[in-house]
Image (cartoon, helix red, strand yellow):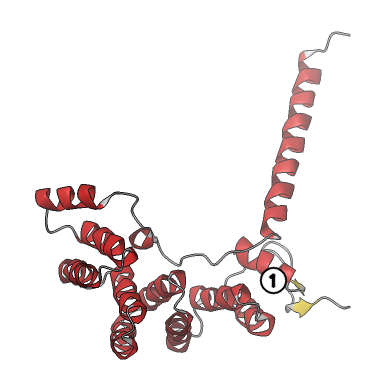
Amino acid sequence: MTLGYRDMTQVARTFLMCALLAYVLIVLAGCAGTVAPTPPVDPVGGVPSDKTESQLVGELNKKFENPQVHYDLARVYHKSQNWNKAEYHYNVALGFDPANRAAQAGLVKMFADRGDKTKAEQYANSYIRQAAISVAETLRLGWEFEQLGMDEYALRSYRQAVAAAPDSDAANKQIGLYYLGKGDSANAKQYLMRSFELNPRQPDVAGALGRLGVVVQTPGIPQGPLEEKKK
C-alpha cells in the first residue's frame, strides 16, 4: 500500500510523539534512581590532575604563577606523603588564589593526614569563617571538604550556609543530599522538602524525595503541600 503525503506526515508525527514520550520516561526514571551529592558550583578546582610530577614542574617552569598547577602538584606530593613539598605548593596556590577552596580543603586534609589535628582544626575554622562572605563560597568549601572525606568540616560549612540563608534552595539541597548520602533519612527529608518548596524545578531533588517516600508535585500542576506517601 502506498502512503499519501498526509499519511506519511501523520506517521512521522506519531513517531516523534512516541520518541518524546520515551525520552520523558527515561528522564523520570533517572530522577528516581541514585542521587549523588552534586556540587553547588563548578568543581574544577577539586578535580585531581592526571599529570605526572615532571609534567607539572615543567608547566611551573613556564608559568610559576599558575595556582591550579601548584594545587595539582601539591596533590601529587600529598598522595606520596611528601608533606613539606605538599604544604609548600598548597600555600603557593593559595598565595596566588586566596579563595581557592580546593587548596584550602587540601591543606586541612594534609595536616590531618600527617597527624597534626590541632593545625587542621585551626585552618579549617579559619577557612570556614572566611567563606562566610557568601553562601555559594561556603557551599563550595563544604563540598571540597566532603570530597576529601572530612565530614565534620563539610557539615559545619553546610550548616553555616543554611543558617546564613535559610531560604536558599541551594543550601537546603546541599545539606539534604549530604544527609541522604550518609543514610540519615529524617534530616535528608527535612532539608530536601524545604529546598523543593523554595524551588520546585529541581528534578534531582524530586527524585531524591521520591526515594524517601515523599510525593511532590511538578510545576504546571496545581500545587498542594508536600506530603508523605501513606503506607
In which quarter of the view is residue 71 placed? Answer: bottom left
Q: From the viewer's perspective, tell me whether residue 200 is left or right of residue 157.
A: right
Residue at (34%, 64%) from the top-left corner?
79
Query: What element does badge 1 sit on?
Result: helix
Q: From the viewer's perspective, tell me whether residue 119 is left or right of residue 24.
A: left
In the displayed structure, would residue 63 be above or below residue 192? above
The residue wearing badge 1 is: 209
Would residue 162 be visible to someone looking at this image? yes
Q: Quadrant of the N terminus?
A: top right
Q: Total marks drawn?
A: 1
Taking depth in this image into account, of 97 and 224 the one nearest to the observer is 97
In percent of width and height, residue 153 lies at 42, 83
Residue at (23%, 56%) from the top-left corner?
69
Question: What type is the residue that disc 1 sits on?
Answer: Leu
In percent of width and height, residue 98 lies at 21, 73
Q: Quadrant of the C terminus?
A: bottom right
